[in-house]
Image: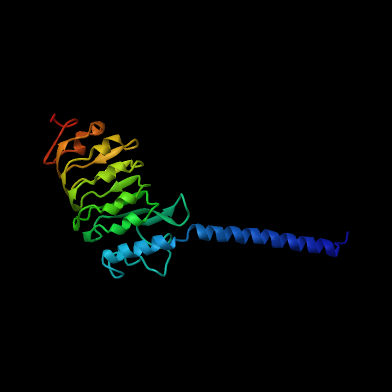
Amino acid sequence: MKTTPNKFLLLHLTLLFLSSIYFSTSNADDVEFSCNANDKATLLKIRDHFGGPNGRLSDWDNGTDCCSDWSFVGCGKPLPGRITVVTISRGWGLSGTLPAEFGDLPYLNFLSLAEMPKVTGPIPNSFSKLQRLQKLDLGSNSLSGSIPTFLGQLKGLQEFDLSNNKLTGVIPASFGSLPSLSQFNVSFNQLCGAIPTGLSKFAKSSFDHNKCLCGAPLAAC
């Protein structure tokens, strides 16, 4: 049977249509992993705070994609290209205070800046903007000042570690009302006062080695 020109035309158009679907899908995948421009600008400010382009975060380069090419960061849901994870720890030699710019990463749900004893100073007020935060690990630094009340108002918080710092004052009562909190550690600080009732479910080791904390699971006040 001979193939008519109309059938050749139909086949050609079909192939063009399928090709357009393939390349549209490929481009969509590229967009999914392309770093959001605002998040990239924020991370570059954080890099500069911690020593600039020649410092420990040297692969945080404006000419590359922060979702696919940068160390210590990750992108994901709920929106493609938004920074959801920053985890820097253990011997990377970072020093100085915590950058306030972390508060300008609105989709951050996991932040770990731990085991860096030259990281000092208070927890910035800008962290109050991290309303999607689920895990916060600032353990084994040299942070000082009090535990901010606003951290206990981050309703999605599940894991919280401020152990091995130089924090003073009390544990804000708001932590006792966090509905999803499953891990909590403020040991090895200089905290005082009564442990909020809602935190009594955590082990004694979560509160040990403070100046004068009291109440369950420690001794009564």
Q: Along the line of sight, which residue is nearer the eye, 55 or 108?
A: 108
Q: Please identify the quadrant where the N terminus is shown.
A: bottom right
Farthest left residue in view: 211
Q: How is the image coloured?
A: rainbow
**Vertical side of 108 occupied by 4: above or below:** below
Farthest right residue in view: 1
Q: Position of residue 117 (x, y in %)?
A: 19, 55
Image point (34%, 50%), residue name = 130
Image point (25%, 50%), residue name = 138
**Vertical side of 35 occupied by 171: above or below:** above
Image point (35%, 44%), residue name = 134
Question: On the rendered structure, is 23 left or right of 153?
Answer: right
Q: Please identify the quadrant where the C terminus is shown.
A: top left
Total number of numbered discs in the rendering:
0
Q: Position of residue 151 (x, y in %)?
A: 28, 45
**Vertical side of 123 occupied by 40: above or below:** below
When asked about the image quadrant of residue 66, the answer is bottom left
Question: On the rendered structure, is 62 left or right of 147?
Answer: right
Q: Position of residue 207 (x, y in %)?
A: 18, 38
Q: Position of residue 164 (x, y in %)?
A: 18, 47
**Vertical side of 45 occupied by 110: above or below:** above
Image point (32%, 67%), residue name = 58
